[in-house]
Image: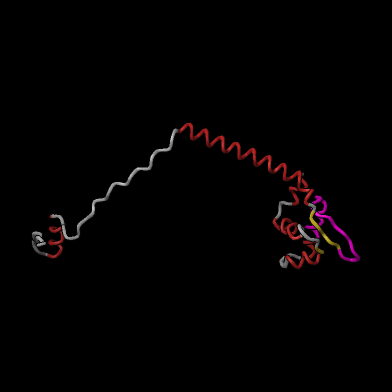
Amino acid sequence: MDAIIAALSTPRRREILRLVWREERSAGEIHRALPDVTFGAVSQHLKLLEAAGLVGRRREGRQRFYLARPERLAPFREWLESTWDGALYRLKLRAELEEARRGPAPRPRLKKKQATTNPTKTTRAARTTTAKRRGGEPTKPTRRKT
């Protein structure tokens, strides 16, 4: 299991495994699919994946073809699912206990209506301040006829 985890620990090896998951590919094809990686690096990644048992290798003349071995991931998958299921169960239990401890969720509060200001109405203080700035006396508000 540790060899599988180590083999899957880098994104590059996971990408190589994805490339050979459904169809057999030569090392050269894999290298061409990853243009930013040297052929030597691809070869080293393939050796590690092969040592972990995640890919099989077939030799044909000077070429080597690689294909994923999904059955080798079964123990890792079972371990991951059991770990994940256990962690999710513990999280669910903790959330339910916390909810029970707190009681029901409070109702959302309604927002108070904000007083709408009428632009035609001004306070006496506002009229006085405005008048002082202008250098004059405060004026009385005029009534609008409707």
**51 relative to 90, above or below:** below
Among all residues in the image, which is located at the extreme top? Answer: 101
Q: Residue at x 29, y 46 (%)?
A: 112
Asked if residue 35 is among those painted magenta in the image, a careful observer would answer no
Does residue 138 appear in this view?
no
Q: Nearer the viewer, residue 50 or 145?
A: 145
Percent coordinates x, y for residue 137 in the rendering = 8, 61
Does residue 16 appear in this view?
yes
**94 relative to 128, above or below:** above
Magenta residue span: 43-63
Q: Quadrant of the N terminus?
A: top right
Direction from residue 74 to residue 99 in the image, left or right: left
**71 relative to 119, above or below:** above
Percent coordinates x, y for residue 99 in the rendering = 48, 35
Direction from residue 89 to residue 68 in the image, left or right: right
Q: Quadrant of the C terminus?
A: bottom left
